[in-house]
Amino acid sequence: MKPNSNRLKLLIGLKYINLLPLSLFGMKKHYTTIAIIITNTIVLFLLLNLIAYFIPSPSKKNKLEESYFSPNDLAKENPNILQEIHEGRPIKEIIELYNENPNVKSHPVLEFMTIPCNGKFYNVGFENARYNSFVNSTNIKSKINNGIWLFGGSTMFGTGVTDNETIAYFLNKIDTNNSYINLGVPGYRQRNEIEKLILLLQKGYKPKQIIFLDGLNDLYTNSGSNFNALETPSRGFNAYAHNFNFGFTGLSFNLVYAFPIVKLYYEYLAYYMIKNKTISAENLGKVYEEDALYNTKSYLHYKLGEVNSNLDKGMYLGNKNLQNYYQSNIILLNALSKSYQFDYKIFLQPIGPHLSTNSFIKDSITFKNNFHLYLNVKPVYEGLKEMAKSNEFPNLYDISDSHLDCKNPYIDLTHYSKSMNKKLAEIILQKRN
């Protein structure tokens, strides 16, 4: 029996071995099918994202870019005007000047700051100040104390002009008894500027006087914001920096929102929520309630604000909201100026889209009927100008009409030319003392 038993085991083993290739072939076929399904799924997903990338956002029906020229457009269509604005500079150098404009990067306290740079046209360094031939890397540390600090957005910074064509440069050139420090940052609102002022004071620096040049960024940002004016970030996504931080949520979570199809889904969802009035501007602005979208669905809340500000008239907040914002800032500045013993002035700036003869506006009628900077900002600005006329705010000055007295005040839709910066410096000096 034993030999037969061994023989039986051998036969069973041989049969198993003979069946093994068939089994492996079946498994191979099975895995091939799975691989094909996975590959097709990935290809389909990528194809959908490619299609979504080219589908326009539902909120951007008005082609606003067609109502005004970019500098590159004007360089192609009418280079003579662009050269006249830049006082004869070659077109190639003008485009180079625009392209060299430095970007901003995140800052742990101030939301963001200008990226320090050392270039042909732009030089930014110590305490994020922009240099010129009067105040530069060799002497700024000795000039910042008891200097006159200049705060503002890109217009004070000098976007589109060289270091020696900014407001700060002309102030230093005209008034040689003082040092003017250019602390402007592209995109800053007055709230950011006050936070930067407080940070510099905490570091131990002591200014002689503070000058603010504001209006455009405050009005534009707040007129399309979901938040209280004092809590509105200069860049909407920065309000959710913690939620979308790579270290906090992990890589995979963040990548989801980078896909065009996901972005498009949220844009259309936000668009229909606003158009169908399933959510109101009042509810959008609720931050402190436990079930507020700001707390529970950050990305949707961000898209609701983004879409709403791009609709026909955006979120019109009215004069009172912005007046309260400036009043609150002035109360704080009054307290700071007394405690740290400095004087301050706030200048309501000229706004490019409000000038009908702006060389970069193609059709002023179409522009006024469609562009957010005109629709939302113009009515609110009139209220702020009335506020500046009152005796209640002696440190607030309206110089918004000064672009009427300059032949070529703008180097693009909103930023000031060399000649305009010189004129603003002269006006500021007249009212500073």
Image: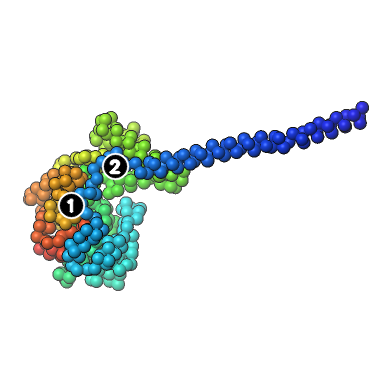
Horizontal side, residue 396 vs residue 155: left or right:
left
> Residue 362's mark?
1
Residue corresponding to mark 2: 306
- Disc 2 marks which amino acid? Glu
- Which quadrant would residue 175 be assigned to in this image? bottom left
In this view, 292 is above or below 325: above
Q: Position of residue 284 (x, y in %)?
A: 27, 36
Query: Which of the two residues, 237 or 209, is positioned nearer the viewer here?
Result: 237
Q: Nearer the viewer, residue 24 or 314?
A: 24
Q: Earlier in the sequence, mark 2 or mark 1?
A: 2
Q: Residue 83's spot in the image, x, y percent?
A: 20, 65
Q: Is residue 379 above or below residue 131?
A: above
Which x, y percent locates residue 234? 27, 49
Query: Looking at the image, which is closer to me, 36 or 269?
Result: 36
Question: Quick check: can you spot residue 6?
Answer: yes
Q: What residue is shown at x 41% (from left), y 42% (from top)?
A: 49
Q: Residue at 23% x, 71% y: name it.
A: 134
